Image: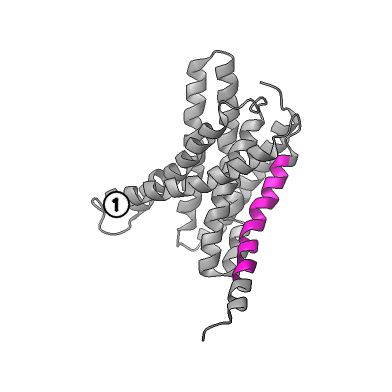
Amino acid sequence: MIRPLASFYGGNIILIVAAVVPAFFLLRFIYRHDRLERESFTMIRNLVLMGIVSTFIAVMCERLGMYVLSFFFSEPTVLYNLILYFLVVGLSEEASKYVVLRRATWNSPEFNCKFDGVVYAVTVSLGFALWENIEYVLMYGMTTAMVRAVTAVPGHACFGVFMGIWYGLAKRCELRGDTEAAQKCKRLCIIMPAVIHGCYDFIATLTNAFATIIFVVFVAGMFVVCYTVVKRLSANDEYL
């Protein structure tokens, strides 16, 4: 049956709103914790848009990675999934976020506080999550929207927290003339969130009897750690 046009658009608008709201709720949370000097609306808007751009970069990298994997594995195995989720998906997505993050903020005069690194990285990650979430929700419906609102979207925010910790430290080290430490922190900007992202995706694909419990414990632990870190870094923020 062909639905009336108004019904079609109305249903899709509801789904899009359901997909977008979790990202903006988390964005508001992180923005309110920018205690010393809040970023401009223009900066936040641009970072959300850059996060959306990073989804397209990630898709191209992931397709290339999966194409290369197909030469070595005829079907998914445990080793295949490890490589896929840690090196292809996790690394591609977090590196793509980092590329646009660095381009948009590294030389910005607004980047003048240590906690800014967390704000910027989380904002880019939520731009990524927002666009990804719209695609999933439009394909699979409201149930998917509800599940992803408490898993994938805050998951990307957490990946952004781990990236932002090292991003702020990298900026401070460079401003203090410690180039070697700055380079190390920049590498950790990608490595740390990519590893955690890989763990998240890999655990989500487990099919044993305890898989759901393991996933819930992992996600809950990640959320608690990130919430605690954000609170602590916000309270102890300082100018670079």
Q: Residue at x 73, y 27 (%)?
A: 236
Does the magenta portion include 28? yes
Question: Which residue range is magenta in the image?
Answer: 12-31
Q: Quadrant of the C terminus?
A: top right
Vertical placement of residue 204 versus 50, above or below:
below
Q: Residue at x 61, y 60 (%)?
A: 19
Vertical placement of residue 121 versus 114, above or below:
below
How far across and how far down the image is residue 187, in percent?
A: 47, 29
Residue that extends furthest to the bottom in the rendered view of this protein:
1
Residue that extends furthest to the front in the rendered view of this protein:
5
Give the residue pinned by disc 1.
67
How far across and how far down the image is residue 47, in percent?
A: 59, 41
Residue that extends furthest to the left in the rendered view of this protein:
71
Q: Is residue 214 visible?
A: no
Instruction: State how the image is colored.
Output: one colour
Vertical placement of residue 171 versus 162, above or below:
above
Identify the image quadrant of residue 163: top right
